[in-house]
Image: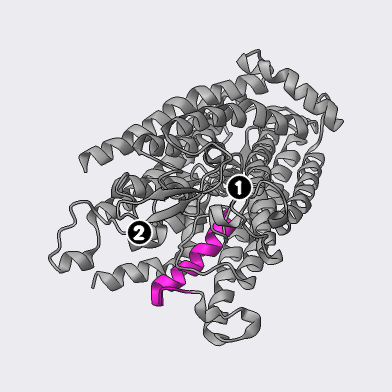
């Protein structure tokens, strides 16, 4: 177990060692300084010319949002029709069928919003054409959309008084060419050299140790797996995701993929400090996020190492920890760590089955997504944290009798209302969805319009409730992982989760960007002796308290009915 803990520490340590210089490089690029990334300029200018974009044109916050929402609508139409006709299109060597309209609706929305919730089974649900030109394409552009939205906030906080907040298309294109594409190339090469498929060949026939012949899917998987990790997307090429031996062949690839999940979100936190020339502020934000992350990692890893108390009561030793639903290549500790890394971000990839983890590990995973701000997804994680920060500034100002200010701008009723609405939306989507599915399951178990909800759950009682709670939490947080005891590929879950995905993605982007635009247009006042310091660790503690209190008030009753009740039931 000591080696397993050492592996976790090494993985996280390498993540931070890579994230700091990456954050500095991102800040230099945003500041217009020359760097190696300028080599991508000819490609970027070609894209601008082909798209008819003037990169020198400045946009206000409303124009940024209009551009983001409009292009996302175009992608929805493109992806939907590709999926419902994929069975008749080329690059389908395995003969996979087209998706039903309700499944295609859920799938295309899921990938556009950076969730990649898969109600289909990886290699059997998409063709090579749609894996590459729909799923992988959306994994790049959805991640870039989140980063571009965050850069609006960067510009707003740095400018004194302005409505000119850069150009969405420049932020969007350069997020791909200068961050996602180069990093994905490196990770894809590592994966391909480690044995991950990178060809266009169809299924291969392989003889097992038992002498059976099985058909194993292949395809250009390495490239998709690289961007699914780096873009905090998470949708796997294979149905088993990164628990599949071809998607994640060994402990080295497991480390590389785990590092890739956190790399860009953490780098963007440091980039904020370098760009604003307020590195203490970024260190405070990083500290708050890391404290929450470490608490949840410690809980999950310790639970998976300890194993099941029910098995222990039978006198059966669990020297390797709880290994149900886990890969022996990685072990219980590495799976526990990954489960929090993937839910702390909006990644959602798995290297073991979350449905098989211990109750308190499931509690940590669900709570991570409910908070949705301990690192979070690329771009949107810091936007979510910004909402908590605005609330913390407002409350702190009222407590000490000072005008709430953040970086020289007053926080007034308009900004606070927007932040409060965004903060309320997240629990509303999760709890309302779970309540609706629970009501249908109990009161309409055989209704035809409910698509036989009695067949939804493979587990009764507390764990079955947790499966439904997890599904809506994952959808609202745009995470994409799931408790796979839930049979979710039916009309009810495809449609209901689809609408939760939409609202859970765009309103938490619209709100912070609107706040940033409003603040950028306000009169800037220099800090004085009476200014509330937002870059102090005392204020960081206040922000952490706000996050915990909001999460506790919103979600503790739901968690008490699910994972906590299951924990106490097996520890009588």
Does the rendering let one see residue 268? Answer: yes
Residue pointed to by mark 2: 357
Crowd band around label 1 with a 10 angstrom C-alpha radius: few (<14), some (14–19), many (20+): many
In the rendered image, residue 460, in percent from the top left (x then y), is placed at 40, 77
Q: Residue at x 60, y 69 (%)?
A: 493
Q: Look at the image and tell me in which quarter the C terminus lies.
A: bottom left
Residue at image point 81% right, 44% down: 66
Helix, strand or loop: magenta stretch? helix
Residue 223 horizontal/vertical position (percent): 56, 36
Q: Is residue 365 magenta?
A: no
Location of mark 1 (residue): 387
* Count of numbered tags: 2
Which quadrant: the N terminus?
top left
Name above or below for residue 216 compared with residue 471.
Answer: above
Question: Which element is circle 1 on?
Answer: helix
Q: 114 left or right of 161?
A: left
**Magenta segment boundaries in residue numbering:** 457-477
Residue 473 included in the magenta stretch of the image: yes
Seen in the picture, residue 150 relative to 301 is either above or below; the reply is above
Q: Residues within 10 Å of mark 2 (few under 14, many from 20)?
A: many
């Amino acid at each position: 177990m000591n080696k397993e803990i050492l592996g976790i520490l090494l993985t996280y340590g390498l993540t931070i060692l890579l994230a700091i210089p990456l954050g500095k490089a991102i800040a230099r690029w945003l500041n217009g300084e020359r760097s190696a990334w300028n080599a991508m300029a000819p490609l970027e200018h070609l894209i601008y010319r082909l798209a008819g974009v003037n990169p020198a044109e400045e946009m206000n916050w409303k124009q940024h949002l209009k551009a983001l929402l409009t292009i996302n609508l175009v992608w929805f139409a493109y992806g939907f029709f590709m999926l419902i006709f994929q069975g008749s299109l080329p690059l389908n060597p395995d003969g996979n069928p087209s998706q039903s309209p309700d499944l295609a609706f859920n799938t295309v929305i899921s990938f556009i919003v950076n969730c990649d919730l898969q109600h289909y089974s990886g290699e059997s649900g998409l063709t090579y054409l749609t894996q590459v030109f729909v799923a992988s394409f959306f994994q790049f552009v959805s991640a870039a959309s989140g980063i571009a939205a965050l850069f609006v906030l960067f510009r707003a906080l740095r400018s004194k008084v302005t409505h000119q907040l850069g150009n969405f298309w420049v932020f969007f294109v350069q997020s791909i060419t200068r961050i996602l594409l180069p990093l994905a190339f490196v990770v894809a090469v590592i994966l391909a050299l480690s044995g991950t498929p990178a060809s266009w060949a169809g299924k291969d026939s392989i003889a097992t140790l038992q002498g059976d012949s099985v058909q194993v899917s292949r395809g250009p998987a390495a490239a998709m797996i690289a961007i699914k990790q780096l873009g905090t997307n998470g949708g796997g090429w294979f149905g088993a995701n990164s628990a599949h031996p071809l998607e994640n062949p060994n402990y080295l690839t497991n480390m590389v993929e785990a590092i890739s999940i956190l790399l860009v979100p953490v780098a963007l936190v440091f980039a904020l400090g370098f760009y604003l020339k307020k590195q203490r502020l970024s260190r405070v934000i990083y500290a708050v996020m890391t404290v929450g992350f470490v608490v949840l990692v410690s809980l999950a890893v310790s639970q998976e190492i300890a194993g099941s108390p029910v098995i222990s009561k039978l006198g059966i030793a669990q020297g390797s920890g709880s290994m149900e639903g886990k890969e022996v290549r990685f072990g219980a500790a590495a799976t526990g760590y990954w489960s929090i890394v993937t839910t702390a971000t909006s990644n959602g990839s798995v290297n073991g089955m979350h449905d098989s983890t211990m109750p308190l590990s499931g509690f940590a995973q669900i709570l991570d997504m409910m908070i949705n701000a301990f690192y979070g997804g690329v771009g949107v994680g810091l936007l979510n944290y910004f909402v908590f920060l605005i609330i913390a500034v407002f409350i702190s100002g009222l407590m000490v009798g000072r005008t709430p200010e953040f970086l020289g701008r007053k926080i007034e009723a308009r900004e606070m209302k927007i932040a409060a609405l965004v903060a309320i939306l997240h629990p509303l989507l999760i709890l309302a969805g779970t309540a609706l599915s629970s009501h249908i399951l109990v009161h309409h178990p055989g209704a035809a319009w409910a698509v036989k909800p009695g067949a939804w759950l493979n587990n009764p009682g507390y764990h079955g409730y947790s499966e439904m709670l997890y599904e809506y939490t994952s959808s609202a947080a745009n995470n994409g992982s799931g408790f796979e005891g839930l049979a979710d590929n039916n009309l009810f879950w495809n449609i209901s989760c689809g609408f939760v995905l939409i609202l859970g993605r765009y309103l938490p982007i619209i709100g912070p960007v609107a706040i940033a635009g409003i603040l950028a247009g306000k009169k800037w006042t220099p800090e004085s002796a009476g200014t509330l310091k937002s870059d102090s660790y005392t204020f960081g503690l206040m922000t952490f308290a706000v996050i915990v209190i909001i999460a506790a008030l919103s979600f503790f009753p739901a968690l008490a009915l699910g994972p906590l009740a299951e924990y106490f039931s097996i520890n009588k």
